[in-house]
Amino acid sequence: MQNFPGVGVSPGRIIGTIRQMPKPVSEPPAGEQLPAGVTAEEATAALKTASRTVHDQLNARAEIASGDGKAVLEATALMATDSMLLKSAAKLIGRGTSGQRAIWEAGSSVSEMLHNLGGYMAERATDVLDVRARIVAELRGVPAPGIPSSPTPFILVAEDLAPADTATLDPEKILALLTAGGGPQSHTAIIARSLGLPAVVAATGVDQLPDGTEVYVDGAAGLITVDPDDSQRAAADQWAATASLLSAFNGTGATADGHLVPLLANVGGAKDAVAAAKLNAQGVGLFRTEFCFLERDTEPTVEEQAAAYKGVFGAFPGKKVVLRTLDAGADKPLPFLTDATEPNPALGVRGYRTDLTTPGVLERQLQAIARAERESEADVWVMAPMISTAEEAARFARLCAEAGIKTPGVMVEVPSAALTAEAILREVDFASLGTNDLTQYAMAADRQLGPLAALNTPWQPAVLRLVRLTVEGSAAEGHNKPVGVCGEAAADPALAVVLTGLGVTTLSMTARSLAAVAAVLKTVTLAEAQELARLALSAPTATEARALVREKLPVLEELGL
Ligand code: PEP
Ligand code: MG
């Protein structure tokens, strides 16, 4: 039995066969010529056959897809046999360039041309790059890039997943996610939890297993085992039988003695918000607005933005919706706001800071939010990401007031903001702890890097202390401003109890985690949660803090969490 230990980031015990996510297609060397003995006619014919195959493969996938996914696949399929693309590649082949290099260069020119046309055409620019990579893969006889398609469900294994990969991820077809890289706050982890899929990250070597290998996955314990034994088969059967118990949240987050902790949802757009409302989320604690525009390379208009925001507000009439202004940069680049050549993007011009280099975008977003709010019934709160100082908080509050936004707030995800929470919270009405970034900055450990996963956990004593400082800052001078948590820490049921004990007022998470967090929270009184918070704070290491708290919460083992 071969084990691959990793970091469990989304619970579930399951057995299935794996499929590896193909590696990205590398660029054919510049200046690559036709191989000796291959004529231009032969190379052009081979290119045409490959492009036709790619076209047919994409069309076949479009036929079984639905909605937005279908339209995207159909448009991409057409691009594969686009005459301008193929003609300019044929011209290069005629001059002696190899077929792979020719389609690569032709793809670049067509993509650049579409980009320069702007609007809808500009959005097709990335489709051309996708198509050219597929054609090169076909010419090389290697698997096409992107999520593999399969008639039967499988466990997806990847080095790591980017937000863009999720667009084509069909949750009906994927049983679990395993990555060799990535950390507990990586996008793979966030995606897995939002889809309710068991997941293990930072499992070194798992990306070397051959397709078709049968594995057992325990997404809470962080374990992957090749050739599962009988006890693991029994554990997977048991999980299948009890998982349904964790799918229902009754709509009120509270401790055993009735201390209310509203459980809110993290959403990226209207679709998520509607799904979260169905799962009885008590509101939205984090609306990641940049997720509405990840594909855009130009700034969306005020009208487009207002429509996207109204879609979310409309799912929660009369309820709280905390919207975050665009958090572009680092792992979420937006070409109209961020500079792809920055040497150190996580420490660069990202989040609120993009207002320094691209003034006006924030003001227009605030106008769009105010407009959407006027046209809906949600109780809209607005916060800025990556706030580091009280001056920034004050300026953001002023911009909100000018736009007619009533409840301004900040995310606390930079250690300086936690350390100066008292001054910051004098300027705004609330704070929300972004524990994903707060952890990566407190530990100076990139949240996307698998080898740093052990540093990158919000159980770290340093992170728990920053949470406590923020809560203390919010209570100073008796102003008692609300402090929520919207990082992934809130979705860990044991940590949710600790955060409650530390005085956090709301917990926001992917809607799929609401039921599990509620189920664990209701087994402790507030005094017990406070005691567990003290216990966690007293532990010298993250591992001990987690182990000590989990030991006092037997319900976790009972529920397989
Ligand atoms: C965070 O940093 O904890 C957070 C919620 O924001 P994001 O994960 O979108 O950076
Ligand atoms: Mg963040």
Image (spheres, grey):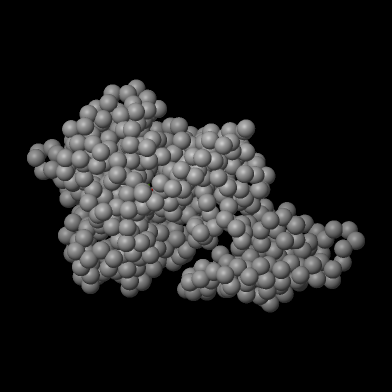
* Residue depicted at 49% across the width and 45% down the height: 237
Name the quadrant containing residue 479. top left
Q: Is residue 490 visible?
A: no
Which one is nearer the viewer's eye here, 309 or 228? Answer: 228
Front one among 274 and 556:
556
Total labels drawn: 0
Considering the image in quadrants, where does the C terminus appear?
Answer: top left
| Residue at 40% across, 27% down | 543
Q: Tell whether 284 sits left or right of 57.
A: left
- The answer, for residue 507, to whether it is visible in the render is yes
Q: Identify which residue, 253 or 309, lies in the foreground.
A: 253
159 left or right of 406?
right
Picture layout, residue 555 above or below residue 273? above
Which quadrant does the N terminus fall into? top right
Residue 12 rendering spot, x and y as whole percentages: 45, 44
| Direction from residue 472 to residue 311 in the image, left or right | right
**To which quarter of the image does residue 440 belong?**
top left
Q: How far from the left and from the top, in percent, is residue 322?
A: 26, 56
Picture quadrant where residue 258 is located? top left
